[in-house]
Amino acid sequence: MIYDELAMNNGVIFQHTYDILNEKMRQGMINLKNGSTGADGMATLDAALFVSVVVNCSFACELFLKAMLHQNTRGHKLDELFSALDNTIQENIKMRTIDEMKKTTSGYCDTDFQNDLTQNSNKFAEWRYFHEGNTQTANLEFISRFMKSIFSAVNEERKR
């Protein structure tokens, strides 16, 4: 069930922003790898969009999770929001994410999912203050596949 339609709709906006920025970032990285500054000379700046990509992707995850929780749910930690979901929805999201992760890491399993969720749980809060130098690593592959899995689950819930 969708409890917060506004969170869902805002999540779609941040997911769309992630998609646009991620494509631009990837092209910048390809250009740099090939020794090019890109057609517009902005390859270095485009590659640096990683920060914005992580922030937007993580925030979309948060909003999609909050859409399936009671309105006015607070907090940014994805693992805490995820654990507040109905067990059936949790399992749906977890299995979708594991299936997606297996496309690049064949042995990916429940334990890997839980580790990745814990390690990437607070990336929105950490990376939006990137300029303060407190950020650590971010597993964008996991976060983006998790986001897409949550989005699929939200859409299923919306149809009920």
Image (spheres, rainbow, N blue to C red):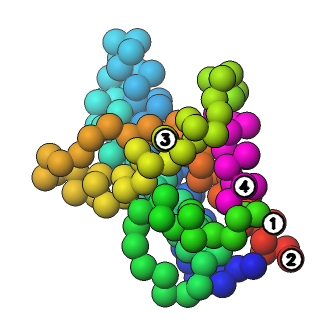
Q: How far apart are marks 2 and 3 (CA)?
A: 31 Å
- Contact flag, marks 3 and 4 (Cβ < 8 Å): no
Q: For this view, does 72 lie left or right of residue 125?
A: right
Q: Distance between the residues labelled 1 and 3?
A: 26 Å
- Contact flag, marks 2 and 1 (Cβ < 8 Å): yes
Q: Which of marks 4 and 1 is in front?
A: 4
Q: For this view, does 79 lie left or right of residue 101?
A: left
Say what amino acid the circle numbered 3 marks.
Answer: Asn
Q: For this view, does 87 lie left or right of residue 28?
A: right
- Contact flag, marks 4 and 1 (Cβ < 8 Å): no
Q: Measuring from the top left, give residue 48's x and y in whole percent.
A: 30, 38
User: Of helix, strand and loop, which one carries label 1?
Assistant: helix
Which of the marked residues, 4 or 1, is nearer the chain's N terminus?
A: 4
Say what amino acid the circle numbered 2 marks.
Answer: Arg
Using the image as rendered, state which of residue 87 and residue 144 is in the foreground. 87
Which of the marked residues, 2 or 3, is nearer the chain's N terminus?
A: 3
Which of the marked residues, 4 or 2, is nearer the chain's N terminus?
A: 4
Say what amino acid the circle numbered 1 marks.
Answer: Glu
Magenta residue check for 95: yes
- Contact flag, marks 2 and 3 (Cβ < 8 Å): no
Q: Distance between the residues labelled 3 and 4?
A: 15 Å
- Contact flag, marks 4 and 2 (Cβ < 8 Å): no
Q: For this view, does 80 lie left or right of residue 86?
A: left
